[in-house]
Image: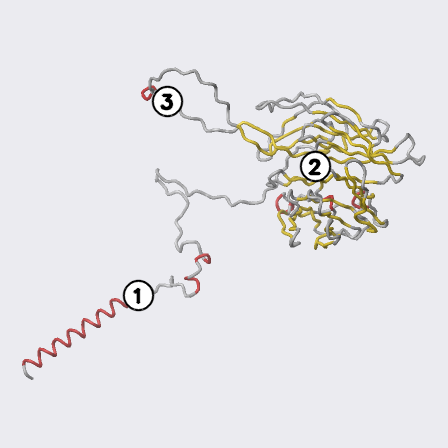
Amino acid sequence: MSKRNLILLIIILSLAIITIFGFLYFRQKTMGPTDGNIDTNFFSKFNLLWNTEPKNPTPTTPVVNTPNYQPNTVVETPQTKLNKVSSMPVAGFTVFIKERLKNVPAIAPITPSAEISTPKVNKKPTPPPTEFAPALRYVEKATGNIYQTFADKIEERKFSTTTIPKVYEARFGNRGESVIMRYLKEDGATIETFVGALPRELLGGDTTEDNEIKGTFLPNNIKDLSLSLDGSKIFYLFESGNNSNSGNSMIGAILNFSNNKKIQIFDSPFTEWLSFWPKGDTITLTTKPSANIPGYMYSMNGTGKNLTKILGDINGLTTFESPSGKLVLYGNSSLSLNIYHMDTKNSDALAVKTLPEKCVWGKASDAIYCAIPKEINFSEYPDAWYQGVVSFNDQFWKIDVKTGNATMILDPVMIAKGEEVDGIKLALDEGENYLFFVN
């Protein structure tokens, strides 16, 4: 072999060896480890939510003899909470907005070495910062004493000491500054209705407990009453005369809290009415419901004129008009909920069963929050529930009025250690961040 051919052979072999070693070297890097940690799921490489934990998570337990160790911060997952507000049975409550002093972190004082000499200037004292928060007031059934607390910080405080034993029903008006208490006299038959004015609180004076509630009495045996939407007036119904069996008529009157004036606006020979005051100048009247009797609903203005029939010929009819005045939530003897449109005169059936009295409208009339029984046994409704023959085990649902879709927001049994809830008197705060009810 010539010298020239030998040199070419050596060059070719060298290039071949370099190529082989280079291929093996780069191929090893590309393949990676073959220890079983390779993810064999192709799609998992594009969906990191399938596995958000590291293969070898860092231990969160302290290391022995490590003085500088700090445990990982635990982030609490937001959950629907169920808090008991009152420590005693209540006759009624209200939700309102209350001003309070704002918690401000204390500022560290300036050290002497850092003080700077400045001329003294007479400045007006800076008022402490305040904030507004939803608060509650409620009446204790046994004594008639009023208590209050903030919604975000449950600290039950007595507000009044005026004693009215065995209050069966309580309503608040005038943004929580007026109270209506209903109870039986000692004869056990006469219904007494007391209307009182609550004293205004001074900012920061929440600890006052010995407030006295002063007020007046409405006529005996008021059959029904309702508050205006702004809480400034009440509409109440009572029978004329002293003997309810002598063919007396039902009288309807309005009381204005601001001036304590009463105006009669309604008179009917039919005596079985339930009233509701959904918006400014509209009052609705619905016949008292029973499973075997057709019910009717009417509306009138605040002067008692323009009495108009809205719904009728529905057994067990119970109604609840929206704040907009354009929709009516109503139920029947089968406890089926429906929404009646005042403009089109059409009804939409909702796929839930409960009573309108166990619901509350959202402020924009676009949603309804209801306590819905998990199961309903065969009986005559709503009579059996009104009489206390049956009670319900409720879940709380939010219903979208436009779509009819229902979303469960709370199952009390799952949270309250098995305690069953039959929810009534549902209410929302102004921002619709809290849902309140009485069990």
Q: Between disc 3 and disc 1, whose residue precedes?
A: 1
Q: Position of residue 373 (x, y in %)?
A: 71, 49
For residue 266, which quarter of the picture? top right
Image position of 307 (left or right of 42): right
Write down the quadrant of residue 363 in the picture.
top right
Secondary structure beneath dot 3 equals loop
**Neighbour tally class for label 1: few under 14, some 14-19, many 20 plus, Cα within 10 Å:** few
Gap between marks 3 and 1, in whole Å? 62 Å
Q: Which residue is mark 2?
A: 229
Quarter placement of the N terminus? bottom left
Residue 344 x, y percent position in the rendering:
73, 53
Find disc 1 in the rendering and name its residue. 30
Secondary structure at numbered mark 1: helix
Q: Quadrant of the C terminus?
A: top right
Task: Return the mark for residue 299.
Answer: none
Given the image, on which type of amino acid does mark 2 rest?
A: Leu
Question: Looking at the image, which is closer to me, 295 or 326?
Answer: 326
Give the residue number, with chain letter if any, for mark 3: 110
Examine the rendered structure and indicate whether residue 223 appears above or below residue 373.
Answer: above
Which residue corresponds to the image point at 12% horizontal and 75% vertical from the top-left? 11
Marks 3 and 1 close (CB-CB < 8 Å): no
Q: CA distance from mark 2 to mark 3?
A: 52 Å
